[in-house]
Image (cartoon, rainbow, N blue to C red):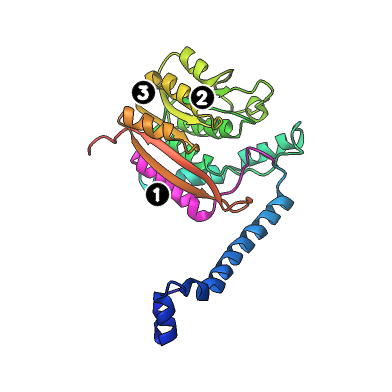
C-alpha cells in the first residue's frame, strides 16, 4: 500500500510523521499479519490431511520454483535456460520413475509415514546438474530412503544413452536405514557405503565431480566431510547442499569456488518455502 494514499488529508499526513502514527495503522498491520497466518494455517491443514510424512519431507515445487531451479543450474553449468528446463521436464514427465515410487510405497515397511507420490522438490536441481555436467562420479552423502539416489541414477542412465558413462556412490550413516528405493530400483547403478561420511570419503579413490550433501545439520560433521572432500574434488567438481551453514561459504572461499544460493518453494507442504539450496562450483571456462 503506497503512502501517497494517506497524504490526501492533513490528519493522515500528521500521523505518518508522528511517533504515535504506528498506533493508528496498527489495525492494518494486524490485518496483514492475520491474513498471512491464515494462509499458512490453511496450507498446514491441507498438508496434515494429504501427507503422512514426519521427517525427510518431500514436496512438489511451484512452477515458478521449477524455473528458478533450472535458472540456477544454467548459471552453475553454463548451459542455456531452455536446455536446463528440458532436463527438468525429463524428470517431471518420468512416469516410469513415478510408478516405481508408488509401487515400492505399497510394500514399504515405512508406508505409514511416507507418501506414495513422486515429489522431487529440490532434487529436480540434482537431476539437471547430473544431466548437464555429465559427471564421471557422483557422491550423495545422506541417502535415507533413496529418492535422491534413484533420481541421480535416472540422470546417469540418460547420460549413458548419449554416450557418457558415470557412476554413483551413496553414503548412509544410519545403519537402520534400508535405502529401499535405491536397493530395489531396476535402473540402479553404483553402490551404498555404510558409515560416517567423512570416513567413507577418506577411503575413496578417484576424483569426485559432483557431491550432494544431504546429511544432518551438525557443524562439526559438515566440516569433517568438507575436509575429507577437498582433496577428492576434481577441478570441475561441484558441491550442492540444502544446509544453511557458514562451513560451505568458508569452503568456497578456501578453494576459490563460486557460490550460488536459491530458495525453492513448495505447493503441498506445511510451509511455503521448500529448501534453501546452495551450490559451490568453479568458474566457467572463458568463452
Q: Picture coordinates of residue 1 (x, y %)?
A: 45, 73
Query: Of the numbered discs in the image, which one, if any, rests on residue 82?
Result: 1
Q: Residues within 10 Å of mark 3 (few under 14, many from 20)?
A: some
Q: Residue furthest left?
A: 287
Q: Picture coordinates of residue 205 (x, y %)?
A: 44, 13
* Number of numbered markers: 3
Q: Picture coordinates of residue 156 (x, y %)?
A: 49, 30
Label 2: which residue? 221
- Select label 2 or label 1 by which is in front: 2
Query: What whole-number distance in Å separates the C-alpha atoms at marks 2 and 1?
Result: 37 Å
Which one is nearer the viewer's eye here, 116 or 89?
116
Q: Residues within 10 Å of mark 1 (few under 14, many from 20)?
A: few
- Select label 2 or label 3 by which is in front: 2
Sequence-wise, the earlier of marks 2 and 1 is 1
Tell me if residue 82 can be seen: yes
Sequence-wise, the earlier of marks 2 and 3 is 2
Query: What whole-number distance in Å separates the C-alpha atoms at marks 1 and 3?
Result: 27 Å
Tell me: 83 left or right of 153. Answer: left
Q: Indicate whether residue 240 is drawn in magenta.
A: no
Q: Which residues are magenta?
A: 54-79
Q: Residues within 10 Å of mark 2 (few under 14, many from 20)?
A: some
Label 3: which residue? 234
Which residue is rendered at x = 68% and y = 52% of the image? 47
Query: What whole-number distance in Å separates the C-alpha atoms at marks 2 and 3?
Result: 22 Å
Q: Secondary structure at mark 3?
A: strand
Q: Picture coordinates of residue 90 (x, y %)?
A: 51, 43
Which one is nearer the viewer's eye here, 247 or 25?
25
Q: Secondary structure at mark 2?
A: helix
Amino acid at each position: 500500500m503506497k503512502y501517497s494514499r494517506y497524504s490526501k488529508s492533513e490528519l493522515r499526513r500528521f500521523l505518518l510523521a508522528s511517533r504515535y502514527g504506528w498506533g493508528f495503522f496498527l489495525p492494518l498491520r494486524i490485518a496483514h499479519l492475520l491474513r498471512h497466518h491464515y494462509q499458512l494455517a490453511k496450507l498446514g491443514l491441507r498438508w496434515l490431511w494429504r501427507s503422512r510424512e514426519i521427517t525427510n519431507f518431500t514436496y512438489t515445487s511451484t512452477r515458478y520454483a521449477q524455473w528458478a531451479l533450472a535458472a540456477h543450474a544454467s548459471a552453475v553449468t553454463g548451459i542455456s535456460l531452455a536446455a536446463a528446463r528440458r532436463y527438468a521436464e525429463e524428470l517431471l514427465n518420468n512416469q516410469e520413475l513415478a510408478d516405481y515410487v508408488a509401487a515400492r510405497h505399497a510394500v514399504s515397511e515405512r508406508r505409514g509415514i511416507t507418501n506414495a507420490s513422486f515429489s522431487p522438490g529440490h532434487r529436480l536441481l540434482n537431476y539437471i546438474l547430473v544431466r548437464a555436467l555429465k559427471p564421471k562420479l557422483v557422491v550423495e552423502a545422506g541417502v535415507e530412503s533413496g529418492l535422491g539416489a534413484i533420481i541421480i541414477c535416472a540422470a546417469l542412465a540418460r547420460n549413458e544413452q548419449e554416450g557418457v558413462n558415470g557412476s554413483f556412490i551413496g553414503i548412509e550413516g544410519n545403519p537402520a536405514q534400508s535405502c529401499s528405493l535405491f536397493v530395489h530400483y531396476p535402473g540402479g547403478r553404483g553402490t551404498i557405503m555404510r558409515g560416517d561420511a567423512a570416513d567413507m570419503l577418506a577411503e575413496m579413490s578417484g576424483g569426485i565431480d559432483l557431491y550432494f550433501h544431504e546429511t544432518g545439520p551438525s557443524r562439526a560433521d559438515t566440516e569433517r566431510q568438507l575436509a575429507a572432500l577437498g582433496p577428492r574434488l576434481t577441478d570441475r567438481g561441484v558441491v550442492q547442499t540444502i544446509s544453511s551453514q557458514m562451513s560451505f561459504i568458508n569452503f568456497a572461499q578456501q578453494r576459490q569456488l563460486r557460490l550460488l544460493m536459491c530458495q525453492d518453494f513448495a505447493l503441498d507442504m506445511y510451509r511455503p518455502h521448500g529448501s534453501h539450496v546452495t551450490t559451490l562450483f568453479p568458474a566457467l571456462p572463458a568463452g
